[in-house]
Image (spheres, grey):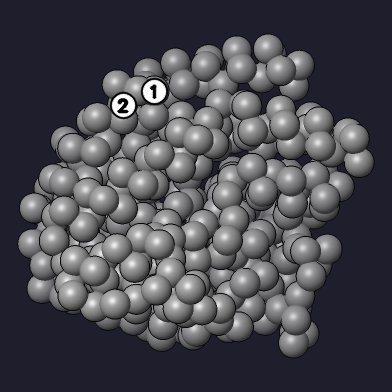
Amino acid sequence: MADSQDLAAKIAKLPKAELHLHLEGSITPSTVSLLGERRGVAISPESAAARYQYTDFAGFLDAFKWATGYLKSPEDYSLIAHRLADDLVRQNVIYAEVTVSVGVMLRYNQNVEVNFNALAEVADRYRENGLRMMWIFDATRQFGADAAMKVAVLAAKFQKRGVLAFGIGGDELSVPTGSFRAVYEFARSQGLHLLIHAGEIGGPEVVRESLDLLGVERIGHGIAAMRDPVLAERLATLRIPLEICPTSNLRTGALARQIGKPKAELSDHPLRDFVERGIIVVLSTDDPAMFGTDLVTEYSNAAALGLSQSQITRLAEASFSNSFLPPEEKRPLLEQFRAGARKLDLL
Ligand SMILES: [Zn+2]
């Protein structure tokens, strides 16, 4: 026990990176309450917290939709980006690729350029204080390919302001993966990196199709690979990282669904098995406020699953080495990580 506390304290101090983190999933109950106040709607933090108590994936998507429904103006986006950045600084996260649900912004007929400028300004400010935030523009699968193309066009347009990648999230069971082929081809032609949520609640075939038809470079979740050793081996060989978010998989019911049980426990999670099969894993929180987690907690989960200290250090390093930054920008961050790990006796 003393050892695990000691490790958690070291992980808290370690300079960290996070690659699967939704801006809108970082809206805490007290922030929803404040956003409601701006719109003249009284929402107590307690009632907002109650909205985050879903038991399945559909309930989670509803809660996500409900909270994002209070984001109207660039000031609102600025507020949530500030609060997210403060929380990352608190955790000694020095690099984050933050996913923005641009598909949802377009659905609400919002001005993406104005909202994104507000986000980019927050990133500029925090960069001076040692936190680098880059962006992933995310389309929503259930809104279909035409809506996704609009998101990809905007992602391409704002690359110079820090957008690195295009991805798709939402309900994996809604629209077939192959229908987004032209969207991913366009995004690739524009120099964007490519990723997708796949094998979260969907089966291994969604992961396979994402590799074969879309050419993605990272997979959000991909826990369905636990049901398909051939796919797991392929992910390891191709060095396609899985962005693994244990608390999220428990809270959304995604893991229970993959193992065919009404409820899953942390001990059911394939994280350790993936690491031992040689799959690159980047550990993340997904929607920290909505799942009541943070990055240090996820590393403690990895330790609880039996990963050794050196395996955990390698996981933490993987979140730097598998970022979408160009190599020359990645290098100084990796050096900062290694210096921190050495100081904490983790290397
Ligand atoms: Zn996600």
Q: Residue at x 52, y 21 (%)?
A: 334
- Percent position (x, y) of residue 7? 78, 32
Examine the rendering and report whether any part of residue 286 can be seen: yes
- Percent position (x, y) of residue 306? 86, 47
Viewed as shown, does residue 71 lie left or right of 86?
left
The amino acid pointed to by label 2 is Arg
Viewed as shown, does residue 268 lie left or right of 14?
right
Helix, strand or loop status at disc 1:
loop
Return the residue at label 1.
Answer: 130
Helix, strand or loop status at disc 2:
helix
Q: Residues within 10 Å of mark 1 (few under 14, many from 20)?
A: few
Alpha carbon of mark 2 to alpha carbon of mark 1: how far? 5 Å
Q: Specify the quadrant that holds the N terminus.
A: top right
Disc 2 under 8 Å from ligand 1? The reply is: no
- Foreground residue among 315 and 46: 46
Q: Is residue 130 above or below residue 265?
A: above
Return the residue at label 2.
Answer: 127
- Percent position (x, y) of residue 244? 61, 55
Residue extending farthest right = 1
Instruction: Return the mark for residue 140.
Output: none
Quarter of the image for residue 176 reads bottom left
Q: Residue at x 45, y 52 (%)?
A: 21
Viewed as shown, does residue 82 lie left or right of 159?
right
C-beta proximity under 8 Å, tags 2 and 1:
yes
Viewed as shown, does residue 27 lie left or right of 261?
left
- Percent position (x, y) of residue 258? 69, 77
Q: Residues within 10 Å of mark 2 (few under 14, many from 20)?
A: some
Q: Is residue 273 above or below residue 344?
A: below
